[in-house]
Image (spheres, rainbow, N blue to C red):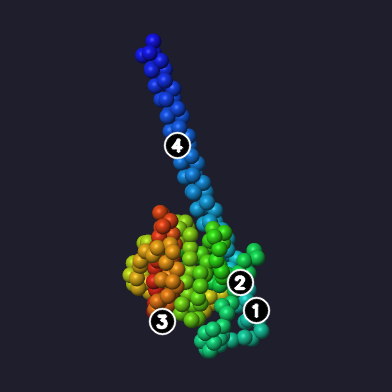
Amino acid sequence: MYRKHDNNRKRRFGTVFMLGGLLLFAAALFLTGYNLWDEQRAGDAVAAILEQMSALQGRAQEGLGATGGQDQEVPDYVRNPDMEMPTVQIDGEAYIGVLEFPSLSVSLPVISDWSAAKLRTAPCRYTGSAYRDNLVIAGHNYRTHFGKLQNLSLGDTVLFFDADGNRFAYEVAGVEELDSTAIEEMVTGDWDLTLFTCTLSGQTRFTVRCIRSE
């Protein structure tokens, strides 16, 4: 009798453990599916924003030609590096320009300021300015955003085009992982451009340091 009772209890425990395992598997499957959907959504959002930015800049150039305007020999930001970076408004959000990684075949719009919610749309300016050579840009680790940063190599080119079409070329000069609380280390140093994103653990930030190449 006792043996039969023990067997029944073991079967009950086995059923509970099996159901628990199935629930964990279902949760993992749901999470994987959600992450894939979220990455696709983020990639589609970036593509749509880049298309709108290109159209807006094209119309601006047409307007400049129609009024007989000519490109300035010395851009305003050279005369006044402390000026605010111009922005392009798309769907109520301000963008300071486009970041390009030729070696990765990736182009990304950059939002003027950052928040956790905005990072789900596109990379964001964390602090600084391209005009003062201290620009810091944060991006989500989506594969369609900054998820490929770890594929950059020393010497790779990084380009940034501001909202007025001014071109800034950089060279990857260093990579490092910083603790998530190392805010001062992230924004200081003799770097003209810093890019960072979360690692998979979320405890550190993969950081790419760049210097101006022209």
Q: Residue shown at 65%/81% (left/top)?
A: 66
Decide which of 213, 14 is in the foreground and name it. Answer: 14
Residue 141 is at least partly visible in this image: yes
- Return the disc, 4 or 1, that comes first in the chain's sequence: 4
Q: CA distance from mark 3 to mark 4?
A: 52 Å
Residue designated by label 4: 25
Q: Residue shown at 40%/63% (left/top)?
A: 179
Most extreme residue toward the left is 154
Q: Residue shown at 64%/63% (left/top)?
A: 91
* Quadrant (top left, top right, bottom left, bottom right) of the N terminus: top left
Residue designated by label 3: 214
Foreground disc of the pair 4, 1:
4
Kindly indicate the quadrant of the structure image that contains residue 21: top left
- Number of on-image labels: 4
Residue designated by label 2: 88
Residue designated by label 1: 63
Q: CA distance from mark 2 to mark 4?
A: 45 Å
